Image: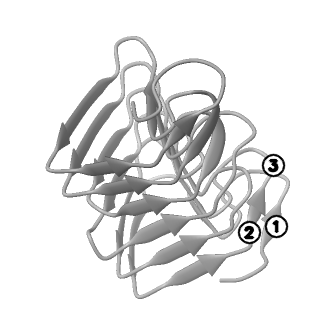
Amino acid sequence: VVDSFTTGGGGALDAYTDVTLDADNVRISDCYAAQGGGGVRVRSSDSARLDHTTIDRCSGGAVDIVVGGNFVVTETTSITNSVSSTNGGAIWVGQGGTLDFRGRAVGNVATLGGALYADTGSTVSCDGATFAENVATSSGGAIATAVSATVIVTDTLIESNVAETLHGGGI
């Protein structure tokens, strides 16, 4: 999926109402969503799994997991060079959302959480992941969290990330 645009959310793919999305060997690039998820948006009762997938150069953030959505990113998936004017250049996990991230997030930019932002009440697990060269214009070069978010990081490489004005070049 290349060069997709929406004034809503989910520039390339928008999982909406009781959808299970399983993407294998997919390339999503140069997509835009005005309401988030330039590449993919997953909502409350939906779940998604990305395997052998590349998401590159998406605006509005690459992935939005909205209120209670469930998302799995395998070790063979990369999210690169994506931008959000707010939070989570690669992935924003909304309230009550869950993320199992084992992939690579490289070269993403956002205000908070250059690669990943975990909102209040969300649960994130990063195991064997890579976060490199991401930039937050405020805090959390690689990862930023809100109050009451649960983020567990295990065996994960976090290198060369930058928080330009406040705290946490890495987390």
In which quadrant is the C terminus drawn? top left
Q: On the rendered structure, is 4 left or right of 150?
A: right
| Residue picked out by circle 2 | 31
Indicate whether 59 appears above or below 24: above
Q: CA distance from mark 1 to mark 3?
A: 8 Å
Q: Which mark is residue 34?
A: 3
Three-letter amino acid code at the position of disc 2: Cys
The residue sitting at the right extreme is 7
Q: Residue sitting at 43 percent across and 70 percent down?
A: 78
**Which of the two labelled residues, at mark 2 and mark 1, occupies the earlier sequence position?**
1
Q: CA distance from mark 2 to mark 1?
A: 6 Å
The residue sitting at the top extreme is 147
Mark 2 neighbour density, 10 Å: few (under 14) some (14–19) many (20 or more)? many
Residue 96, horizontal then vertical, whole percent: 38, 28
Three-letter amino acid code at the position of disc 1: Phe
Disc 3 secondary structure class? loop
Mark 1 neighbour density, 10 Å: few (under 14) some (14–19) many (20 or more)? some
**Which of the two labelled residues, at mark 1 and mark 3, occupies the earlier sequence position?**
1
Indicate whether 97 appears above or below 106: above
Disc 2 secondary structure class? loop
Foreground pick, 158 / 145: 158
Q: Residue sitting at 63 percent across and 53 percent down?
A: 37
Residue 81, horizontal then vertical, whole percent: 63, 63
Disc 1 secondary structure class? strand
Q: Residue sitting at 49 percent across and 77 percent down?
A: 54
Q: Nearer the viewer, mark 2 or mark 1?
A: 2
Q: CA distance from mark 3 to mark 2?
A: 10 Å
| Pointer 2 with pointer 1, Cβ within 8 A | yes
| Residue picked out by circle 1 | 5
Q: Residue sitting at 68 percent across and 59 percent down?
A: 38
